[in-house]
Amino acid sequence: MKVVIDRKSCAPEPVYNYVKNAFETAQRLAGGASDVWQPWADAKPFPQEAAFPRPTEVYQNLAAWLAGRDTPRMLRRTIRIIGRMTLLTLVDRDIDSPYWKAGEADQQDLASSLLLSRYPECLLCSALPLTYSNPCFIIVCNANHIEKAHHDEPNTNNVDTIQNLPVLDGRLVLKIRDGTADSRVMAATSAKTEPMEQDPEGNWIDDWDPKKPEVIVINPQYLRSLQEKGFPRYNDDLINHARLDTARKAAERAAGVEIQASIDLLNTLEITLLHEISHLGTMNWAEDVDDDCYTWDNAVRLQTCTNAENVALFVVATDLTKNHNLKVTKSGMIEPI
Ligand SMILES: [Zn+2]
């Protein structure tokens, strides 16, 4: 499954490199989490609690807090989808070029993911080939591909020129394009979603062209705020920083909001990308299940892998345990094991 990071909208080069690095880190984190959890997901008979990865209590807690509302089957499906993230390959393409637009699409990719999400136990789906010529999603660093529509349809005054789809008024991506979304809006994903949207007359809109990739839009204001902070990355320094309670308090004061969980200090572009990727139809169709679906506290409140934030935090918390010998408490504090 191929992924493009758009060089034009992500210019200049340091920004592009930062986004690329964040994507590669996100993918590495997903791969690490997949390594930890896949044996549990593959265990037979299923569900089999005894086969939880070690340290058992840490991972059992993590599963309970972030996916507790779901059945083990649902958790297993999420693990398989995190594994799918490792199959993504970055390719260097010009998204304005007519060549890839005319090429063979990732149609079967999408078809297999449709099956996978409807029938998580479908063996055939995971056996379908996963290499196609066209990108299955594109990361852009602004929303300039959303243009004014040249027609008089009510409530859809814009069109997504990558997906060739109308954009309903009021969508977040329009606020990102017009610069009216503030920098706390990190990104938006235009994905093949279910259920389909309804037009003003109440008809279901299903005009998805499977030749068109899904699109992750990073808010340029968010990118600028990251640039001003010197392009923070998910790394040892940041993890050590998050562990310091004093740093957490300082961040709370600086942000003017109460940050409950120190793991939220790790919320870098890498984690944003994990969140957005899990929104993709090609991956998971995880949702933003309600208006307060971000941050650790809400993930623990929601307890479902169908929430994108839960998937992202599940990957991060697994990395902390696997590679840093740390655990996350229920209140989101990062402690040595
Ligand atoms: Zn989201």
Image (spheres, grey):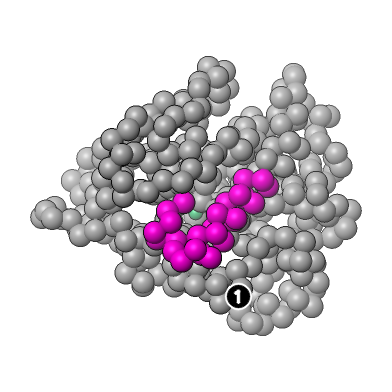
Picture residue at 49% right of the left edge, 63% below the top: 13
Position of residue 39 in the picture relative to residue 7 (left or right)? right
Residue 35 at least partly seen: yes
Which is more toward the observer, 311 or 99? 99
Q: Quadrant of residue 202?
A: top left
Q: Quadrant of residue 127?
A: top right
Picture residue at 77% right of the left edge, 61% below the top: 236
What element does badge 1 sit on? loop
Per the picture, the main secondary structure of the magenta-coloured stretch is: helix
Q: Which residues are magenta?
A: 5-29
Residue 280, above or below 120 = below
Picture residue at 60% right of the left edge, 81% below the top: 256
Position of residue 198 in the picture relative to residue 275 (left or right)? left
Q: List x then y, in percent, for residue 277.
A: 52, 47
Residue 302 at least partly seen: no
Picture residue at 34% right of the left edge, 29% below the top: 104
Q: Which residue position holds label 1?
A: 229
Q: List x then y, in percent, for residue 125.
A: 51, 21
Asked if residue 6 lies in the magenta stretch, the reply is yes
Asked if residue 2 lies in the magenta stretch, the reply is no
Q: Residue furthest right?
A: 337
Report the amino acid beneath label 1.
Lys
Judge the density around disc 1: few (<14), some (14-19), many (≥20) Cα neighbours within 10 Å.
Answer: few
